[in-house]
Image (cartoon, coloured by chain):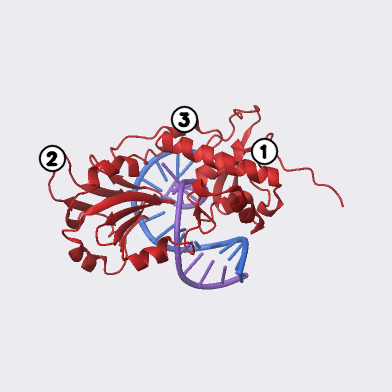
Chain colours: A red, B purple, C blue
Amino acid sequence: MVRGIRPHVEGRILRRLESCPNTCRPLAMTPRLELQVEQSRGKQVIGIKRRAKRIVLQLDDGCAFVIEPRMTGLLLLADPPDREHLRLVWRFEPAAGQGDLWFWDRRGLGTVSLFSPAQLERNLGPGKLGTDALEMSTEMWLSFCRSTSRAIKVALLDQVKVAGIGNLYASEILHVCGIDPRRRASGLTRREIQGLGEATRMVLLEAIQYEGSTLSDGTYRNALNRAGGYQNQHRVYDRAGESCPRCGGIIRRIVQAQRATFFCDQCQRRPHRRKS
DNA sequence: ATTAATGTTCAGAA
DNA sequence: TTTCTGAACATTAA
């Protein structure tokens, strides 16, 4: 999303922000966003970056819009799938060949906030979001695993501990490093944890390269309303009953913490439980 | 027709 | 303190 949007918004001047009137439900926003929006008129976008799963649109006064797409939110430069679910539009001073920026969200769980520098620190800082999954060192992975007795799959989704891993990627990561998703995080060996770190890096970089996963509901799209390509590379996600691409075992689907987990029973197996 | 499922997060309870 | 549960929502498949 960020890569697609950056060339169209960097350096541009904000004219106004509009909440879309024909939307099924008002966009969840920070209180008083409307008021602050008046003050953001004329401000310049100096940059756009990703922080874990959030998108940060930085303004020249130190404030920033933080967009949280959640399940179905999209930032689009053109051609929204429909008008019905448009939630918000940033209107910029006209520039040749460059239009406005839209927030479209089918389910409506996404949020957009306008934060002051202090609020940014509070909402994106270490208390709220852990280290980005792509910036974790082996030492950090070790202390992360030692810190919790939950199943490793569930722990990987804890954004306070490690930020940026979503449900489908947790399954993909654990398949790549061959770890049973039901294993306790604290029970992993040093060697396994090292593999987990490497697998995380590999899967996330791969997914970013392929521009994300457009699942069967077809919702996810990049900034230009194009489907992603990573769904074709999924090893286990949404492939219950199919055979494992690595060992030929059968891929299973289980539920952990009320979320679907996919894994291969054969090459992601629990270690032998030894009587002691 | 119901029910369950969906790339998420958070408050509040256990 | 940590972990679990349910709710927020819209849409589709079983």
The one of A9 and A234 positioned closer to us in this rendering: A9
CB atoms of marks 1 and 3 within 8 Å: no
* 3D distance between C-alphas at marks 2 and 3: 36 Å
Horizontal side of A32 relative to A261 (left or right) equals left
Tag 2 residue: A96
SS class, disc 3: helix
Q: Which of marks 1 and 3 is nearer the N terminus?
A: 3
Front label number (1 vs 2): 2
Circle 2: residue type = Ala
* 3D distance between C-alphas at marks 1 and 2: 53 Å
Q: Quadrant of residue A60?
A: bottom left
Q: Where is residue A226 in the image (x, y as percent from the top left)?
A: 32, 35
Horizontal side of A154 relative to A79 (left or right) equals right
Mark number displayed over residue A268: 1
Q: Earlier in the sequence, mark 2 or mark 3?
A: 2
SS class, disc 2: loop
- Whether labels 2 and 3 belong to a single chain: the reply is yes
The one of A198 and A211 positioned closer to us in this rendering: A198
Horizontal side of A171 relative to A47 (left or right) equals right
Q: Where is residue A28 in the image (x, y as percent from the top left)?
A: 32, 61
Tell me the subunit letter for badge 2. Answer: A
